[in-house]
Image (cartoon, grey):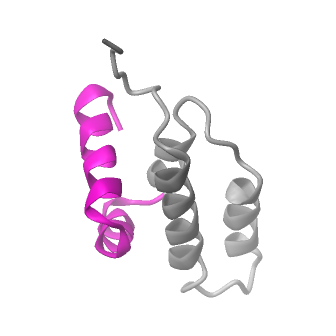
Amino acid sequence: MDKITYYTPPTDEIFEEIKQAATKVWNTYDNQFGYVDEKVNAIKDIGNIQDNAMYMVAMFDSKNQAKLKAILSDDANDFISDRIRKGQL
């Protein structure tokens, strides 16, 4: 029986879903000073290892985490909720 921790990555499908949703949320903001590009570039080539999925979630404040969670599937939201319980996001 595998022990799931905060650092256990999600399935590739859930990881890609979180990555796409995070990019979508970032792209709703004004990029006048390159802030959006900076954030999107930080996650563009990130791999599905350790806590990288949670890193993408943690890039957002609570208001934007709610926006992110609103566009994610139940499975992706369950993954995030489970990891928050196991870690300290």
| The C terminus lies in quadrant | top left
Number of marks: 0
Q: Is residue 25 left or right of residue 68?
A: right
Identify the residue shown where x is 25% and y is 61%. Answer: 74
Report the predominant secondary structure element of the magenta stretch: helix
Across and down, in percent, residue 82 comes to 25, 38
Identify the residue shown where x is 32% and y is 45%. Answer: 79
Instruction: Look at the picture and state if 21 lies above or below 61.
Output: below
Extreme residue toward the front, this view: 1
Is residue 63 on the magenta stretch?
A: yes
Is residue 59 on the magenta stretch?
A: no
When asked about the image quadrant of residue 60, the answer is bottom left
Q: Is residue 74 left or right of residue 68?
A: left
Across and down, in percent, residue 58 comes to 45, 49
Q: Is residue 47 left or right of residue 79?
A: right
Instruction: Look at the picture and state if 82 lies above or below 67.
Output: above
| The N terminus lies in quadrant | top left
When asked about the image quadrant of residue 43, the answer is bottom right
Across and down, in percent, residue 77 comes to 29, 56
Q: Is residue 78 left or right of residue 41?
A: left
Identify the residue shown where x is 50% and y is 76%. Answer: 25
Nearer-the-camera pick, 23 or 16: 16
Across and down, in percent, residue 76 comes to 35, 55
Instruction: Look at the picture and state if 25 lies above or below 75.
Output: below
Instruction: Look at the picture and state if 52 lies above or below 33.
Output: above
Identify the residue shown where x is 32% and y is 36%. Answer: 83
Nearer-the-camera pick, 61 or 27: 27
Q: Which residues are magenta?
A: 60-89
